[in-house]
Amino acid sequence: MISAAAAGSQTAASLGSNDNSANVLAFDGLIYQAFKPGSGASVYTMSPGTAGTGSPLTADGSGGIIEIDTVLKSMWDNYRLSPDTMWVSSQEALNISKKILAASQSSAQRFVFETAQDLVGGGIMVRTYLNRFSMQGGGVVDIKVHPNMPAGTILFTTKGLPYPLAGVGNVMQIRTRQDYYQIEWPLRTRKYEYGVYADEVLQHYFPPRL
């Protein structure tokens, strides 16, 4: 986490202009595809805010979050898409729960109590989010914590489309020529050398679904 300006005399202008973060021989994941120019994905970028803290999500006071509703509305208005899964980091999962519970109206919450003996648990976790922009009038978006999701980032995905694509069974899938395999290389020194590899490619037929 970057919390302050770097010390020293080197500036960003003295760094090279080439982007060396991508590997042309490997796919870089769904977030990279969403940010790629021309992808058509609905991208909402918040202001940087305070260094080390950023800009927090904003509760709308009625059980929702303004930034999430903005993305959901954009996906519906532009492509008639209703995402079914929201991928978050552990930090954002906690932030979403706090925002919804701290500024919600009592009518926007539902609690289920069990009367079994000695079953009292603490803590509340928001596991779903109501999408008000869908053909059903209100769809449920599952909130799932992903171990590799960067903090401060939320990724929406959709398994299906409201219109069919000819010859496309899955909107997104991994096409594998050879799954994970291990090779133990011949001995050259007193240590064992081996490698784990996979020969596969990401097939993504409709980037705006992100």
Image (cartoon, rainbow, N blue to C red):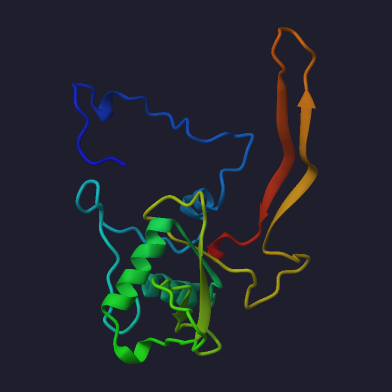
Q: In which quarter of the image is residue 165?
A: bottom right
Residue 67 seen anywhere in this rendered image of the structure? no
Q: In this view, does 177 lie to the left or right of 21?
A: right
The N terminus: image quadrant: top left
- Depicted 51 relative to depicted 8: above or below: below
Which residue lies at the image location 23% right of the left edge and 41% below the top edge?
3
Which residue lies at the image location 46% right of the left edge and 80% below the top edge?
131
* Front position in the image: 51 or 79: 51
- Depicted 115 relative to depicted 151: above or below: below
Q: Where is residue 118 in the image (x, y as percent from the top left)?
A: 47, 79
Q: Position of residue 56 (x, y in %)?
A: 27, 61
Q: Quadrant of residue 73?
A: bottom left
- Depicted 40 relative to depicted 6: above or below: below
Q: Where is residue 101 in the image (x, y as percent from the top left)?
A: 32, 77
Q: Position of residue 96 (x, y in %)?
A: 36, 68
Which residue lies at the image location 51% right of the left edge and 75% below the top edge?
141
Q: In this view, does 58 lie to the left or right of 114?
A: left
* Front position in the image: 178 or 16: 178
- Depicted 89 relative to depicted 52: above or below: below
Q: In this view, does 192 lie to the left or right of 67?
A: right
Residue 88 seen anywhere in this rendered image of the structure? yes
Which residue lies at the image location 52% right of the left edge and 83% below the top edge?
139
Q: Quadrant of residue 194?
A: top right
Q: Residue furthest top?
A: 189
Q: Which residue lies furthest to the bottom in this view?
A: 107
* Front position in the image: 127 or 116: 116
* Front position in the image: 14 or 92: 92
Number of residue marks = 0
